[in-house]
Amino acid sequence: MLHLLVEFRDKEVKSVTDLVSSLQITIANDLQQKYPNLDIHFGGEAEQQQETSSSMITMFLLAMLAIYMLLAIPLKSYIQPLVIMSAIPFGIMGAIIGHWLYDLPLSILSLNGVIALSGVVINNSLLLVSQYNQESLENDDHQQAMVSACTSRLRPVLLTSMTTFAGLVPLLSETSIQAQFLIPAAVSLAYGILFSTIIILVLIPSLIAIQEDMAIRLKRLVSGKANEGVRE
Protein backbone atom coordinates (compact mmCIF):
# COMPACT_ATOMS: atom_id res chain seq x y z
CA MET A 1 0.00 0.00 0.00
CA LEU A 2 1.40 3.36 -1.08
CA HIS A 3 0.72 6.51 0.96
CA LEU A 4 1.29 9.93 -0.59
CA LEU A 5 1.52 12.80 1.88
CA VAL A 6 0.83 16.28 0.51
CA GLU A 7 1.39 19.14 2.92
CA PHE A 8 -0.11 22.44 1.82
CA ARG A 9 0.76 25.45 3.94
CA ASP A 10 -0.24 28.51 1.92
CA LYS A 11 -4.02 28.62 2.57
CA GLU A 12 -4.35 32.14 1.21
CA VAL A 13 -3.86 30.79 -2.29
CA LYS A 14 -6.43 27.99 -2.18
CA SER A 15 -8.86 26.40 0.21
CA VAL A 16 -8.78 22.72 1.06
CA THR A 17 -11.87 22.16 -1.09
CA ASP A 18 -10.24 23.80 -4.11
CA LEU A 19 -7.01 21.90 -3.54
CA VAL A 20 -8.75 18.51 -3.37
CA SER A 21 -10.77 19.32 -6.51
CA SER A 22 -7.58 20.31 -8.32
CA LEU A 23 -5.81 17.11 -7.24
CA GLN A 24 -8.83 15.05 -8.28
CA ILE A 25 -8.81 16.58 -11.76
CA THR A 26 -5.07 16.80 -12.43
CA ILE A 27 -3.66 13.73 -10.66
CA ALA A 28 -6.29 11.33 -9.33
CA ASN A 29 -8.24 10.90 -12.57
CA ASP A 30 -5.07 10.21 -14.60
CA LEU A 31 -3.84 7.67 -12.06
CA GLN A 32 -7.17 5.85 -11.99
CA GLN A 33 -7.19 5.64 -15.77
CA LYS A 34 -3.70 4.12 -15.81
CA TYR A 35 -4.36 1.88 -12.81
CA PRO A 36 -8.06 0.89 -12.69
CA ASN A 37 -7.67 -1.02 -9.39
CA LEU A 38 -6.12 1.97 -7.67
CA ASP A 39 -8.03 3.25 -4.64
CA ILE A 40 -7.44 6.95 -3.89
CA HIS A 41 -8.49 8.35 -0.55
CA PHE A 42 -8.10 11.96 0.58
CA GLY A 43 -7.44 12.27 4.31
CA GLY A 44 -6.49 14.98 6.75
CA GLU A 45 -8.47 18.20 6.72
CA ALA A 46 -10.34 17.22 3.56
CA GLU A 47 -11.64 14.07 5.24
CA GLN A 48 -12.59 16.02 8.34
CA GLN A 49 -14.51 18.54 6.25
CA GLN A 50 -16.44 15.79 4.52
CA GLU A 51 -17.40 14.15 7.81
CA THR A 52 -18.32 17.47 9.37
CA SER A 53 -20.42 18.47 6.37
CA SER A 54 -22.61 15.37 6.67
CA SER A 55 -23.13 15.95 10.40
CA MET A 56 -23.85 19.64 9.80
CA ILE A 57 -26.65 18.75 7.38
CA THR A 58 -28.22 16.53 10.04
CA MET A 59 -27.92 19.30 12.62
CA PHE A 60 -29.46 21.78 10.18
CA LEU A 61 -32.51 19.54 9.66
CA LEU A 62 -32.89 19.10 13.42
CA ALA A 63 -32.64 22.87 13.86
CA MET A 64 -35.40 23.37 11.28
CA LEU A 65 -37.62 20.91 13.13
CA ALA A 66 -36.95 22.64 16.45
CA ILE A 67 -37.71 26.07 14.95
CA TYR A 68 -40.98 24.78 13.49
CA MET A 69 -42.09 23.34 16.83
CA LEU A 70 -41.15 26.49 18.74
CA LEU A 71 -43.19 28.58 16.30
CA ALA A 72 -46.18 26.25 16.00
CA ILE A 73 -46.87 26.08 19.75
CA PRO A 74 -47.35 29.82 20.49
CA LEU A 75 -48.92 30.61 17.11
CA LYS A 76 -51.34 27.64 17.41
CA SER A 77 -51.06 27.05 13.70
CA TYR A 78 -49.45 24.47 11.44
CA ILE A 79 -49.30 26.78 8.40
CA GLN A 80 -47.96 30.06 9.77
CA PRO A 81 -44.64 28.53 10.94
CA LEU A 82 -44.08 27.37 7.36
CA VAL A 83 -44.86 30.90 6.13
CA ILE A 84 -42.34 32.33 8.58
CA MET A 85 -39.69 29.73 7.71
CA SER A 86 -40.12 30.36 3.97
CA ALA A 87 -37.59 33.18 4.36
CA ILE A 88 -34.81 30.73 5.22
CA PRO A 89 -34.13 29.49 1.64
CA PHE A 90 -33.82 33.09 0.47
CA GLY A 91 -31.39 33.78 3.29
CA ILE A 92 -29.32 30.83 2.09
CA MET A 93 -29.43 32.28 -1.44
CA GLY A 94 -28.13 35.56 -0.04
CA ALA A 95 -25.30 33.72 1.72
CA ILE A 96 -24.33 32.03 -1.57
CA ILE A 97 -24.42 35.38 -3.40
CA GLY A 98 -22.22 36.88 -0.69
CA HIS A 99 -19.65 34.10 -1.12
CA TRP A 100 -19.71 34.73 -4.86
CA LEU A 101 -19.14 38.47 -4.38
CA TYR A 102 -16.19 37.82 -2.05
CA ASP A 103 -14.90 34.94 -4.19
CA LEU A 104 -15.01 32.59 -1.22
CA PRO A 105 -15.59 28.83 -1.35
CA LEU A 106 -18.31 27.31 0.78
CA SER A 107 -16.67 25.85 3.87
CA ILE A 108 -17.62 24.42 7.26
CA LEU A 109 -17.69 27.90 8.75
CA SER A 110 -19.99 28.97 5.92
CA LEU A 111 -22.40 26.22 6.96
CA ASN A 112 -22.11 27.35 10.57
CA GLY A 113 -23.08 30.82 9.43
CA VAL A 114 -26.05 29.44 7.47
CA ILE A 115 -27.35 27.54 10.51
CA ALA A 116 -27.04 30.67 12.64
CA LEU A 117 -28.66 32.65 9.84
CA SER A 118 -31.71 30.38 9.88
CA GLY A 119 -32.48 31.39 13.45
CA VAL A 120 -31.95 35.09 12.75
CA VAL A 121 -33.82 35.39 9.45
CA ILE A 122 -37.14 34.26 10.89
CA ASN A 123 -37.18 37.17 13.35
CA ASN A 124 -38.33 39.63 10.70
CA SER A 125 -40.94 37.20 9.37
CA LEU A 126 -42.17 36.59 12.91
CA LEU A 127 -42.55 40.34 13.47
CA LEU A 128 -44.79 40.66 10.42
CA VAL A 129 -46.88 37.57 11.16
CA SER A 130 -47.35 38.45 14.85
CA GLN A 131 -48.42 41.98 13.98
CA TYR A 132 -50.79 40.65 11.32
CA ASN A 133 -52.41 38.31 13.85
CA GLN A 134 -53.00 41.22 16.19
CA GLU A 135 -54.40 43.43 13.43
CA SER A 136 -56.69 40.67 12.13
CA LEU A 137 -58.31 40.38 15.58
CA GLU A 138 -59.38 44.03 15.33
CA ASN A 139 -60.09 44.13 11.61
CA ASP A 140 -62.13 41.57 9.64
CA ASP A 141 -60.62 42.81 6.38
CA HIS A 142 -57.51 40.62 6.06
CA GLN A 143 -55.97 42.74 3.32
CA GLN A 144 -56.28 45.90 5.39
CA ALA A 145 -54.87 44.04 8.39
CA MET A 146 -51.82 43.01 6.35
CA VAL A 147 -51.32 46.56 5.07
CA SER A 148 -51.45 47.87 8.65
CA ALA A 149 -49.02 45.17 9.84
CA CYS A 150 -46.50 45.92 7.07
CA THR A 151 -46.79 49.66 7.63
CA SER A 152 -46.20 49.42 11.37
CA ARG A 153 -43.38 46.87 11.14
CA LEU A 154 -41.53 48.16 8.07
CA ARG A 155 -39.17 50.42 10.02
CA PRO A 156 -38.28 47.85 12.75
CA VAL A 157 -37.61 45.16 10.13
CA LEU A 158 -35.35 47.42 8.06
CA LEU A 159 -33.52 48.86 11.07
CA THR A 160 -32.89 45.42 12.59
CA SER A 161 -31.45 44.06 9.36
CA MET A 162 -29.38 47.13 8.52
CA THR A 163 -27.86 47.39 11.99
CA THR A 164 -26.98 43.68 11.97
CA PHE A 165 -25.34 44.03 8.57
CA ALA A 166 -23.49 47.18 9.66
CA GLY A 167 -22.20 45.37 12.74
CA LEU A 168 -20.66 42.66 10.55
CA VAL A 169 -19.04 45.07 8.06
CA PRO A 170 -15.83 45.60 10.13
CA LEU A 171 -15.26 41.83 10.19
CA LEU A 172 -15.98 41.54 6.47
CA SER A 173 -13.39 44.23 5.70
CA GLU A 174 -10.75 42.76 8.02
CA THR A 175 -7.54 41.79 6.23
CA SER A 176 -5.57 40.20 9.07
CA ILE A 177 -4.78 36.50 8.81
CA GLN A 178 -6.26 35.81 12.26
CA ALA A 179 -9.71 36.97 11.13
CA GLN A 180 -9.82 35.17 7.79
CA PHE A 181 -11.34 31.97 9.13
CA LEU A 182 -14.33 33.95 10.51
CA ILE A 183 -15.13 35.79 7.29
CA PRO A 184 -17.12 32.93 5.61
CA ALA A 185 -19.50 32.76 8.58
CA ALA A 186 -19.80 36.57 8.64
CA VAL A 187 -20.55 36.64 4.90
CA SER A 188 -23.28 34.02 5.34
CA LEU A 189 -24.88 36.03 8.13
CA ALA A 190 -24.51 39.50 6.64
CA TYR A 191 -25.65 38.87 3.08
CA GLY A 192 -28.22 36.25 4.09
CA ILE A 193 -29.92 38.77 6.37
CA LEU A 194 -29.65 41.59 3.84
CA PHE A 195 -31.04 39.56 0.93
CA SER A 196 -33.79 37.84 2.88
CA THR A 197 -35.08 41.11 4.34
CA ILE A 198 -35.81 42.46 0.87
CA ILE A 199 -37.62 39.25 -0.05
CA ILE A 200 -39.50 39.04 3.27
CA LEU A 201 -41.23 42.38 2.75
CA VAL A 202 -42.81 40.99 -0.44
CA LEU A 203 -42.95 37.24 0.19
CA ILE A 204 -44.53 37.06 3.66
CA PRO A 205 -47.53 39.33 2.90
CA SER A 206 -48.13 37.41 -0.32
CA LEU A 207 -48.02 34.02 1.42
CA ILE A 208 -50.35 35.20 4.19
CA ALA A 209 -52.80 36.53 1.60
CA ILE A 210 -52.70 33.18 -0.21
CA GLN A 211 -53.22 31.34 3.08
CA GLU A 212 -56.26 33.45 3.97
CA ASP A 213 -57.78 33.05 0.49
CA MET A 214 -57.34 29.29 0.64
CA ALA A 215 -58.86 29.18 4.14
CA ILE A 216 -61.90 31.16 2.97
CA ARG A 217 -62.39 28.94 -0.06
CA LEU A 218 -62.03 25.82 2.06
CA LYS A 219 -64.65 27.09 4.51
CA ARG A 220 -67.02 27.85 1.66
CA LEU A 221 -66.45 24.41 0.19
CA VAL A 222 -67.05 22.68 3.52
CA SER A 223 -70.13 24.80 4.31
CA GLY A 224 -71.49 24.16 0.81
CA LYS A 225 -71.18 20.41 1.21
CA ALA A 226 -72.76 20.63 4.68
CA ASN A 227 -75.74 22.56 3.28
CA GLU A 228 -76.20 19.99 0.53
CA GLY A 229 -76.17 17.22 3.15
CA VAL A 230 -78.86 19.01 5.20
CA ARG A 231 -81.08 19.46 2.14
CA GLU A 232 -80.85 15.80 1.28
Image (cartoon, rainbow, N blue to C red):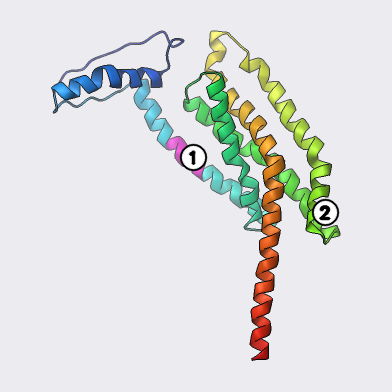
Q: Residue at x 42, y 32 (%)?
A: 53
- Badge 2 marks a residue whose secondary structure is helix
Q: Which residues are magenta?
A: 55-61
Q: Position of residue 14 (x, y in %)?
A: 42, 14
Q: Quadrant of residue 34?
A: top left
31 in relation to 209, above or below: above
Query: Residue lying furthest right in this view?
Result: 138
Q: Quadrant of the N terminus?
A: top left
| Residue at (75% x, 32% y) in the render | 160
Residue topped by disc 1: 59
Question: In the figure, residue 185 lies in which quadrant?
Answer: top right
Determine whether the residue tagged by mark 1 lies in a helix, strand or loop: helix
Is 158 above or below relative to 85?
above
Residue at the disc numbered 2: 144
- Give how far across and how far down residue 58 sits, in percent: 45, 41
- The residue under the point 68% across, 83% down is 227
In which quadrant is the C terminus drawn?
A: bottom right
Q: Residues within 10 Å of mark 1 (few under 14, many from 20)?
A: few
Q: Measure how far apart labels 1 and 2 are at the Cα level.
A: 40 Å
Q: Is residue 57 magenta?
A: yes
